Image: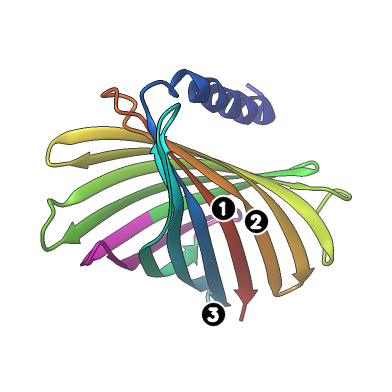
Amino acid sequence: MNTKITFLAQVLATLWLIPSAFAQSTYRIGGLPSLNLNLKLNNDWSLNTKLESRQQFRSGEWNGKAIDQYEYLLTDLSLIAAKKIGLNSRLAGGYLVRSGEGEWFHRFIQQFVVVQKLSGFRLAHRILSDQTFSKHEKPGFRFRYRISSEIPLNGESVDEGELYLKINNEYINSLQAMEYDLEIRLTPLLGYDITESFKIETGPDYRINSFINGNTRHSIWMMLNFFIEI
């Protein structure tokens, strides 16, 4: 099947699921800003450092009560090292530390990324696994697949001083204390390539999970991502 059609079918399937999960569900709305520092090293190695925070502005039930209250939820700091292993692929691994809910969480990350450069369109496939540990919670294990598109809004490629559209669709399988859950994420972002080494992306990050056991939870985080090449 054509790659573009496959990607579009996945996005439409996610959009179809959203309205059917509104009944008897809860939601959270907030902000999710991040700063990404990327460093290119010798021998096709690269290093990414990411600082991200999450704040909640509103929560409640669909067709029910809502609470408008600011709450700082967490801070993430991650360090990922990647090695290019092919023309359009790379292997990566790293570590993330999270401060939130009065506790520290430690996460180990392994991922494989393949990028397809098509005519006027670019797709990136990411397969990722991670393991999270903390003092007071059972270990959590996740297996994730994300497909991302990057579409230039002017011409065939994204050049300096131009806007672009990025759409991420991710499926996250998680297992903790022998309980399985599936989370689906859909993130449309508008990006601006300011200079060769600096760009910004912004847009909503929509997440839905716990719909398998009937306690559906929706999260909408407004993202503001800064990317700096060093």
Left or right of 27? Residue 15 is right
Mark 1: amino acid:
Met
Left or right of 68? Residue 133 is left
User: From which residue to which does the magenta span run?
Assistant: 85-110
Query: Mark 1, residues whose alpha carbon is within 10 Å: few (<14), some, or many (≥20)?
Result: many
Main SS, magenta region, reads strand
Residue 42 in sight from this viewpoint = yes
Using the rendered view, name the quadrant where residue 40 is placed.
bottom right
In this rendering, which labeled residue sits more in front, label 1 or label 2?
1
User: Residue at label 2?
Assistant: 202
Left or right of 139? Residue 173 is right
Judged from the image, the secondary structure of the residue bearing numbered disc 1 is strand
Q: Is residue 91 above or below residue 51?
A: above
Residue depicted at x 37% and y 28%: 25
User: Residue at label 1?
Assistant: 222
Q: Are discs 3 and 1 less than 8 Å apart at CB?
A: no
Question: Which mark sits nearer the N-terminus, 3 or 1?
Answer: 3
Judged from the image, the secondary structure of the residue bearing numbered disc 3 is loop
